[in-house]
Amino acid sequence: MILGCDISHWQGTPEFSAVRASGREFVVLKATEGATVVDPQFVANRPGAREAGLLVGYYHKAAAGDPGAEADWFCGTVGDLAEGEFVCLDWEVPGEPVGWSCAWLAAVQRRLGVVPLVYLNSSLRDGHDWSPVVAAGSALWLARYDEVTDAVPSGRWPALAMKQYSRTGSIPGIATAVDLDVFYGTFDQLRALGRQGAPAPADQPTDQPWTRLPTLHYGDRGPSVLSLQKFMTRVFPSYTGYSPTGNYLDLTAAGLEEFQHRTGIADGDGRTVGPRTNQQLWGFGYRG
């Protein structure tokens, strides 16, 4: 078995290198909720976790709205997955979860090419017939706060894949209480639940798709600027107070500068959206 944790904006700004050094091998990041919410720390958390060498998963917190719309929101936010990265559905709301989950899980599998895990508590696991979800291949991530890493019954699932065994854990690099998780398998087995295929090489050729996005500059106007502004408003919470206008001026430059710094472009000043910034935007689902 291997140990990990799951986090959202409630954990502030983790020092992921310290999390990795503590022996945690994976982290599950909150990406989205419903069809309109992106976790405020998602843009910063993903590159930080990747750079620290943690295997990264992403979860969507269901709001029981239209499952197709929520699946689109999640997939559009997480964008392209790196090799081995996995995804999860978190169901914690009233309603009939099985049919809804089947629709969401199938839509995400079609878009991202991976079979999501499903996160439930014991009451939900035992209170519904999850056979269609089991048959579709979704593994179980169970919330059971017994403070130990021992496996517990898996209900209709043949085995328990992962358990969230504490919600008051302590990990170096995270200043607040944090959810602790255990995966009942090896690191490679967890990677096998995620995206398969080699990542793009470091010396990427110039015909990568993000290089075909337009280069934008401070002062530009038009539909390309408006498209970028609408995307930033959707996926980047710090930008939600801005009104897309199609004019690339001070507010857009300030938002882009923050986005650049959060995603590792330390010398970005927000006044140019070139190939490096477009590559980062592409990774979060921007397609122009």
Image (cartoon, rainbow, N blue to C red):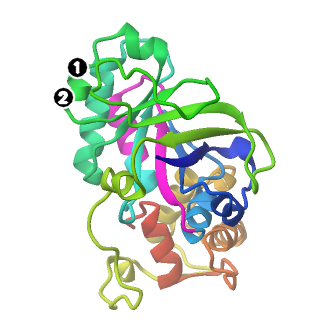
Which image quadrant is residue 17 in? Answer: bottom right
Discs 1, 2 touching: Cβ within 8 Å: yes
Position of residue 61 in the picture relative to residue 262 (left or right): left
| Residue 223 in view of the camera | no
Amino acid residing under circle 2: Ala
Residue pictured at 24% horizontal, 37% vertical: 106
Q: Position of residue 193 (x, y in %)?
A: 32, 50
Residue 121, compared with residue 261, is above or below; it is above
Residue pictured at 34% horizontal, 30% vertical: 67
| View extreme (right): residue | 175
Position of residue 27 in the picture relative to residue 86 (left or right): right
Q: Which residue is mark 1?
A: 131
Tally the numbered discs. Answer: 2
Question: How far apart, in angstroms, are the residues tagged by discs 1 and 2?
Answer: 6 Å
Q: Which residue is mark 2?
A: 135
Q: Position of residue 174 (x, y in %)?
A: 75, 51
Q: Residues within 10 Å of mark 2 (few under 14, many from 20)?
A: few
Q: Nearer the viewer, residue 3 or 85?
A: 3
| Residue 145 highlighted magenta (yes or no) | no
Q: Nearer the viewer, residue 44 or 199?
A: 199
Q: Quadrant of the C terminus?
A: bottom left
Give the magenta part as a residue range: 53-74
| Residue 81 in view of the camera | yes
| Residue 64 highlighted magenta (yes or no) | yes
Identify the mark at residue 91; answer none if there is no mark. none
Residue 161, compared with residue 224, is above or below; it is above
Which image quadrant is residue 267 in? Answer: bottom right
Q: Secondary structure at mark 2?
A: helix
Q: Secondary structure at mark 1?
A: helix
Residue pictured at 36% horizontal, 12% vertical: 96
Amino acid residing under circle 1: Ser
